[in-house]
């Protein structure tokens, strides 16, 4: 099969389209003929070698942590899913390689919502997993106010929608050019940067209950001050979290508490309550450009690779 791989850590120039052996579905897994796969900051963190001590990879490696397509192989013990079903889900990337390939194995999945294109579905699962995991860690519940630092990106937009579905008020930081974009999702937009607490006060007179840092802009001290307690702040992007007493949340090998969010999100999408805004869609041959676009930190929504 064809797939994008890298044989060594480095810049986006290490990515190559190659002919590789096909993966196969193991127990509790399905294999899909991939139509699209998402790009996240973790993809280029891993490719660069930045996380080699935290998430060691077997090289050569196929990037892509989530994917969407059509089931063509069902592993032992799988029920409720059959060959020919259209699904989206998460790839056991550290073991068998990722979604930037003709075929990929999924370890968690849900039916693709009728309203989503393959590109939207291909970029959804990783962010849904992250958003669900973070909301659970924060104890996010009806009536709370959530602040998202970096709300206009792929994780921010889906976290905002899932939080709103739980009954939370959501405030999101973004550049002024993205304020109208955030309002589409019921988010109260504020400009990020110094003096954030002063801008938050008029829109959250009762204060902020919980905070997600999805930007990693070095603002944790400010976010902790706004929340009033580091235990009420979670980051997915700032590796200096421990120094501030803040929890750093990342995907773990094996079962994730965020997996349960996939069917919930699919149901919300079928009800018209969850969309996947796309920043850009790249062909598989331009995977390097997709990684570079993600690395700018200025994506508005999700970056996706169309596999075929």
Image (cartoon, helix red, strand yellow):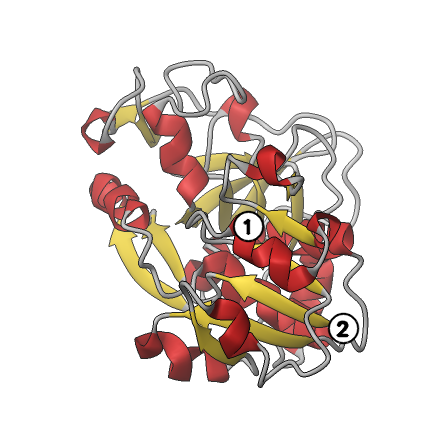
What residue is disc 1 on?
221
What residue is disc 2 on?
144
Residue 261 image position (x, y, % from top left): 71, 56
Residue occupying image coordinates x 55% and y 21%: 95
Position above or below: 299 against 272: above
Residue occupying image coordinates x 26% and y 53%: 282
Residue 38 image position (x, y, % from top left): 43, 49
- Left or right: residue 71 versus residue 306 is right
Closer to the camera in the image, 223 or 213: 223
C-alpha gap between disc 2 and disc 1:
21 Å
Residue 246: quadrant of the picture: top right
Labels 2 and 1: the sequence-earlier one = 2
Number of other residues with Cα within 10 Å of mark 1, as a class: few under 14, some 14 to 19, many 20 or more: some
Residue occupying image coordinates x 22% and y 25%: 14
Residue 248: quadrant of the picture: top right
Closer to the camera in the image, 19 or 183: 183
Position above or below: 197 against 127: below
- Left or right: residue 82 versus residue 7 is right
């Amino acid at each position: 099969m064809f797939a994008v791989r890298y044989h060594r850590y480095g810049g986006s120039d290490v990515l190559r389209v190659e002919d590789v052996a096909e993966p196969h579905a193991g127990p509790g897994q399905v294999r899909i003929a991939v139509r699209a796969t998402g790009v996240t900051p973790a993809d280029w963190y891993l490719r660069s070698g930045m996380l080699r001590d935290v998430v060691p990879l077997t090289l050569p490696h196929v990037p892509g942590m989530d994917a969407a397509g059509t089931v063509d192989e069902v592993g032992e013990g799988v029920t409720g899913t059959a060959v020919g079903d259209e699904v989206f889900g998460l790839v056991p990337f550290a073991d068998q390689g990722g979604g930037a390939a003709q075929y990929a194995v999924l370890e968690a999945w849900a039916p693709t919502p009728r309203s989503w294109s393959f590109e939207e579905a291909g970029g959804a699962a990783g962010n849904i997993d992250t958003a669900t995991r973070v909301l659970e860690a924060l104890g996010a519940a009806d009536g709370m106010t959530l602040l998202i630092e970096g709300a206009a990106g792929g994780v921010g937009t889906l976290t905002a929608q899932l939080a709103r579905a739980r009954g939370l008020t959501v405030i999101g930081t973004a550049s002024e050019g993205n304020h109208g974009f955030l309002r589409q999702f019921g988010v109260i937009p504020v400009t990020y940067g110094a003096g954030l607490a002063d801008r938050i006060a008029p829109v959250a007179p009762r204060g902020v209950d919980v905070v997600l840092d999805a930007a990693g802009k070095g603002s944790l001290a400010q976010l902790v001050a706004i929340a009033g307690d580091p235990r009420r702040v979670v980051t997915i992007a700032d590796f200096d979290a421990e120094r501030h007493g803040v929890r750093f949340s990342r995907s773990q090998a094996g079962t994730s508490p965020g997996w349960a969010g996939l069917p919930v999100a699919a149901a919300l999408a079928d009800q018209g309550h969850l969309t996947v805004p796309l920043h850009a869609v790249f062909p598989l041959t331009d995977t390097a450009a997709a990684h570079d676009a993600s690395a700018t930190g200025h994506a508005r929504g999700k970056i996706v690779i169309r596999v075929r």
